[in-house]
Amino acid sequence: MIGRLFFFLLLSLTLAGPASAEQSEAERAARWSDLRHAIFGDRVVEDAGDLVVIDAPARAEDAAIVPVAIRLAETLAPEILSLYLVIDGNPSPLAAHFLFGPLADTKEIATRVRIDDYTYLHAVAETADGRLYATARFIKAAGGCSAPAGKDQALALERLGKMKLTLSARLKPDAPIGAKLLVSHPNYSGLQMDQLSRNYIPADFMQTLDVSYNGRSVFRLESDIAISEDPSFNFSFRPADSGGPGVLRAEILDSSQRHFTQSWPVPAAPQM
Amino acid sequence: MRISQRAFAVAAILFLFAPAPCRGESVLLAMTEIAAGVFVHNGVHEEASPENDNAIANIGFILGDDAVAVVDPGGSAKEGRELRAAIRARTDRPIRYVILTHVHPDHIFGAAAFLDDHPSFVGHAKLPGALAQRGDYYLRRLRETLGDDAEGSEVVAPTILVSSRLDLDLGERRLVVRAHGPAHTDNDLTIFDEKTRTFWLADLLFVDRIPVVDGSLVGWLKELDGLTVIAADRAVPGHGPVSVPWPAAVEAERRYLETLARETRAAIGVGVGIADAYREVGQSERGKWLLFDDYHPRNVTASYKELEWE
């Protein structure tokens, strides 16, 4: 199975011409309208106002590694089942779909993405009762999807699939724990040509990431080539146990059908 | 030296009186003979542009009794042709080797100008992999940037790969080519000319122009430890003056890289994000390097990505 996101890649290539820095606002609006319909069909997509905020640099220093954080208002966060990140100008615009589990603390999630051209980013939060809240942010960056990856290719190969987790301190049994997860994976976009062989380097990217705590889901991510090389995620979870200790587990399936799993102990909260 | 002065004069006259931009073999690249038989062209401290034909790196050639070795053919086929013309203005000896010190466009895209000489193209064992990953992207960028002046530039594959050391005999002159671990890139070569004790470090040594971290920051610092114990009468940096004292000239680069490592680790330690780190890291180096704002933020991002795995 190629996967739904890859389907959108193919679809997007058939949509109105490639994005470019010279695109007019009307063209950008038309692009989003097309994408919105492709992803959400006829569902109503409401303006999120201050309920959903995208935090990203206005101008990226490195278009292949653009940090993006999505924040949800305290009032909205508990209602949210899933979150879409769309990069309108990318060859594969639907960059990520986070599906939150019962243990997710959805107030903020962050990752790093590739951006191929000056573009709007859209974050769309979906509530349990099916409402969609969208917000947009414009970013000046170009060339991120076809930019060369791999500064140290031997290391990349040796480290493939390895993960690193950093946890914030666990102060109270019921407080959310912040986590930063790094995954070593080239996330090849399939858009780089090998000049010597005249072949494209095949796409090879993380398709799904499942994060769970003690067997209960924190989130599942369906992702794509727009996630930067060595994917990085900042998220929070509520252990919902009596204070631990517990085990956080991450499970990855990539487009080459490789499967990577790693687990980390989560220390117990201090006795109150 | 008489010949080089004449060649320079010819080049100057062509520049002054040519009615249209010169093409092909008629223009000679300006060379400095920094030691007997070691010729270096001084790259300008600029980003690639149509005005400079991507001639922004120090490139050149070494003359033996039997043959010539090119050390980096330059940033475009046009620069490569001008380098070739500068060689042919001095000698008819065969161009036996074209050494590609690493994958970066300002060093390799002149290679196509030497194809008719049928030299061996010498590269690091990891150069083919890097060319596969990046060659297409670099070529497209070169064409975008230089326009017509990129014409003829292409990705040329190395025909001799070096994984540790290779000695090249040019006739009464031995060059020691060493392959290094990931540092400036993951495919860096240096060349030591035993005859004049000239150490050609290419982009493992930046002087005046800010170093670019595109391999491994930790690896580069480690390589510097090994490089600085090699005794030489002079060094050729990839960017900077054509000849500098060795190892004294490496100290500024080492200070920058050490600062980058120390302060990036500190930023990661206190949870500064990858996008914000460059505002805090290495600010004491501002003003000490040309093109600081063009490359420093990317260096911090690259270092952050590397060091967050520690």
Image: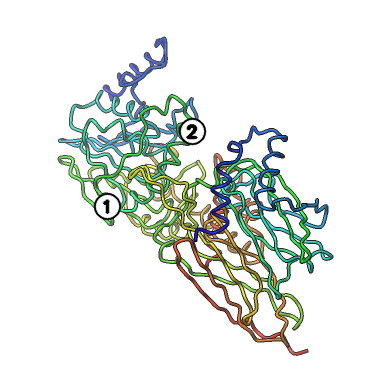
Amino acid type of disc 1?
Val
Res B48 label:
2
* Quadrant position of residue B239: top left
In the image: residue B286, left or right of residue B143:
right
How packed is label 2: few (under 14 Cα within 10 Å), some, or many (20 or more)? Answer: some
For residue A76, above or below residue B139: below
Percent x, y of residue A177:
70, 75
Residue B58 is left or right of residue A161, and the answer is left
* Protein chain holding label 1: B
N-terminal-most mark, 1 or 2? 2
In the rendered image of this protein, does residue A37 appear above or below residue B79? Answer: below
Assign a secondary structure to mark 1. strand
Judged from this view, the residue extending furthest toward the front is: A42
Which element is circle 2 on?
A: loop
Nearest the camera: A32 or A232? Answer: A32
In the picture provided, is A195 more to the left or to the right than A24? left
Sort mark 1 into few (<14), some (14-19) or many (20+) by Cα contacts within 10 Å.
Answer: many
Q: Which mark is residue B162?
A: 1
A151 lies left or right of A271: left
| Residue beneath the point at 58% across and 38% down | A18
Query: In terms of depth relative to the viewer, which is nearer, B202 or B121?
Result: B121
Q: How far apart are marks 1 and 2 (CA)?
A: 29 Å
Label 2 lies in what chain? B
Q: Position of residue B125 (x, y in %)?
A: 30, 53
Asked which quadrant contains residue A88, the reply is top right
Quadrant for the N terminus of chain B in the image: top left
* Mark 1 and mark 2 residues within 8 Å of each other at the beta carbon: no
Q: Where is residue A82 in the image (x, y as percent from the top left)?
A: 70, 63
